[in-house]
Amino acid sequence: MHLTRRQTLGLAAAAVAGTTVAGTTTAQAGTDRWVRETLRRMTLEQKVGQLFVCYAYGPTADTADARNTSLYGVATPAEVVRKFHLGGVIYFAWTDSVKDPQQIARLSNGLQGAALGDTGVPLQISTDQEHGVVFRVGPPATQFPGAMALGATRSAEYARQAAGIGGRELKAVGISTDFAPVADVNVNPLNPVIGVRSFSSDPAVVAALTAEQVKGYQRDGRIVSTAKHFPGHGDTATDSHTGIPVISHTLEEWTRIDRPPFEAAIRAGIESIMTAHIVVPALDPAEDPATLSKPILTGILREQLRFDGVVITDSLGMKGVRDKYGDAEIPLRAIEAGVDQLLMPVDPGLAYNSVLDAVRGGRISEARIDQSVERILKLKLQTGVVDQPYVDLARVAKVVGTPANYAAAQRIADRSTTLLKNDAGLLPLSPAPRKILVAGYSPAALGTALQGRGATAVVKDTGATPTDAKIDDAVAASAEADLTVVLTMKAWDTEVTDKQAKQQKLVNALLATGRPVILAAVRDPYDVAYFPSASTTLATYGYAAVSMEALAKVLYGELAPTGKLPVAIPAQPDPSVTLYPFGHGLGLDPRQTRLTVASYNIHAGAGEDNVFDLDRTAQALKALNADVIGLQEVDVHWDARSQWRDTIAELAATLGMYAGFAPIYDLDPPTPGQPRRQYGVGVLSRFPLVRTENHPITRLSTQDPNPVPAPAPGFLEAEIDVRGRRVHVYCTHLDYRADPSVREAQVRDTMKILAGDRRKDLQILTGDFNAEATAPELAGLWTRLTDSWTATGTTSGGPNTYPAVDPVKRIDFVTVGTGLHVLRVAVPPEQAASDHRPVVADLSFRP
């Protein structure tokens, strides 16, 4: 592309800046010369056009769109640029500007051609690519975690890296200005418009990360960075899009809280600052919005903070700036206050002509216009857009969304996830296959991440305002799942986001089921305060795919959660109480693979009518949420009690688990050609069974008459593979009620079988016993039971179940080898009237 001589003036400035003192002087002289010559040849109409940054509809510069005709009186984006001699344009999805990187790059080149053909000055092309929850250029462009996620990492390196990579990707498609970072300090948890767009509630954290992002965008990405929203939008409960926020900070509070990030940005060399449509009486007693306030923009920003870069307004279509003055007056007051660029006026023709008329009529001097245009021209020259207004289409795919960039985004997300509460000891999850309901706001990405880890993910996208029907559907689905993960997005905000508090209704309904629920706040972390009964809560600060992948890693213990709250979370309904302080964040040992094991006498499934009920038993087993279940009194085509069904096979199919079985009785069928009648013990496992074995053990039948043939061994060993570890699960049913000598022999046999296993460290023994806990013949077994038995004794219900035959007690147990640790043991409440109670143990592997 051939450039005119005037377009190439000052190229030396970009090439030699910062090399030597003499070189710097030469560069500055070149910059000044190009700016002076360009300004001298521009008409007043062209100068005024440089002040405006507008949007235009259409994916290409030459696309005719009726919306352009309605707003601007011309049909194509190129005609809009030429008609108003625009200094800048802004891209949005709703203007069809950002469909994919190649389309964006072609649009940028087309618009630059229109601008150069009109004024000879290239456009400043901009967008809001804050990352996190506010972005305009979507995938395949790299999607980084947003500001508050970066705040949770406390990493200056990550903040700069995200901005640098993001800046280079934007530059590759022709975008030379990013309206980022957000320099607001979010000290108000009820802030409806900033929230996770802010790095933190701590001014020092915001200042440090703001400065690093400025360096990343400008020095590494070579684009313009725009800090926003001056003088600070972090303490408002009103959205400036829909009202006029009033900030009640005193001058001392503003100086201490809101000022430091903007000072840090200026020290870092920020080239542009965006104004806020907020009223700060302590800074301007006239109570004009900051965008229109000379005391704030000239008195504080220009004179006190000595900022001489470009000041741009926030969108002039927002209610916060339009309520006090009319649309023709707003641009004039903004310029008089110290603004250089006017962003998105509601009526561009009215605003443009209003400024022209004000200059021609003497209200605003042309020298004042020149002052702003000079800043804008310097900005364009320093950014390199004067030197290279067009982008190379062939390079776009080499820069945008590369594997290396994606990996960098994932590394940052991995460090940001914050574990707030793990009271039930649910995390980390075992890697066993399980059915997981993922419900709430935008759950698809997390569902995909969980599916990739072997889970069967059922996704129910209920959105930000769930209907009652969607809530009922999600609750019904949770009954069929082993675990529910529910994602909330500003569930606290019942003024704007979710006016009927339907997200809160959804989460509370899921918690009320009593099933295991994990709550993840995927936008504002403040959501968790509204669900005090949730025992497992996390914050991700965003719902981008990288954040959901990081959440999945934390859930499964693939990495330790290292994010620390960058804000404090107040309690509800009393916000004067702090629920979680600034800096809170739990850790987990990622090596601590979890395993939940239960011992359950399946006779409980028979209930009072002594008839086995498959659905009732399946629900009881599902409620245990165990990875491995040792079962006693298992019927396989036994008799009318189980309706001649193969109960363990049917339960395994219903629960989606693997099954192993060892008979105690193995009898001929009552009718030739029918299956054998079997009764014994079994194991259900979410992990595949590598091997099973039925070990011999002393038996004494209490049946009358004794069955023929003699009892089978009935001591099951099932070898399972848990993430590369071979675990040996044993299950026994020592159900002989009146003969201590038999019990003594059974204990002796049990100990011998366990001792014969070379991997004693990874043994798990499940079973039950009809005996009093103090029976002397059990003493040898209790030495193996010490760990889990002691823990069980502290739970509600104790280690002994209801009497089977008084005074003998039914004892259910789970005990482990030295390579495993018992974290928690519980005796769950009865699911049906029975003389049996299960025991559930949460285990972990010792490092």
Image (tube, rainbow, N blue to C red):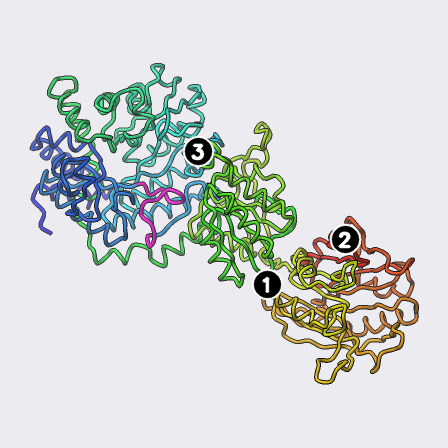
Q: Which dot marks residue 432?
A: 1
10 Å neighbourhood of mark 2: few (<14), some, or many (≥20)?
some
State the residue position of label 2. Answer: 791
The image quarter in which residue 772 lies: bottom right
The residue located at (49%, 32%) in the rendering is 189
Report which quarter residue 358 is drawn in.
top left
**Disc 3 designates what residue?**
496
Q: Which residues are magenta?
A: 128-141
| Count of marks, rendered view | 3
Magenta span contains residue 129? yes
Mark closer to the observer (1, 2) = 1
Among numbered discs 3 and 1, the one appearing first in the sequence? 1
Pick whichever, 770 or 213, lies toward us: 770
Residue at the spot 55% in from the left edge and 51% down from the top edge: 485
Question: As shown in the figure, which amino acid type bears the numbered disc 2?
Answer: Ala
Mark 3 vs mark 1, CA separation in Å: 41 Å
Q: Counting other residues with Cα less than 10 Å from the Cα at mark 1, is it few (<14), some (14-19), or many (20 or more)?
A: many
Q: Which mark is residue 216?
A: none
The secondary structure that dominates the magenta segment is loop
The location of residue 757, given as percent across then percent down, is 73, 74
Percent position (x, y) of residue 508?
A: 58, 42
Amino acid of disc 3? Val
Q: Are marks 3 and 1 in contact (CB under 8 Å)?
A: no
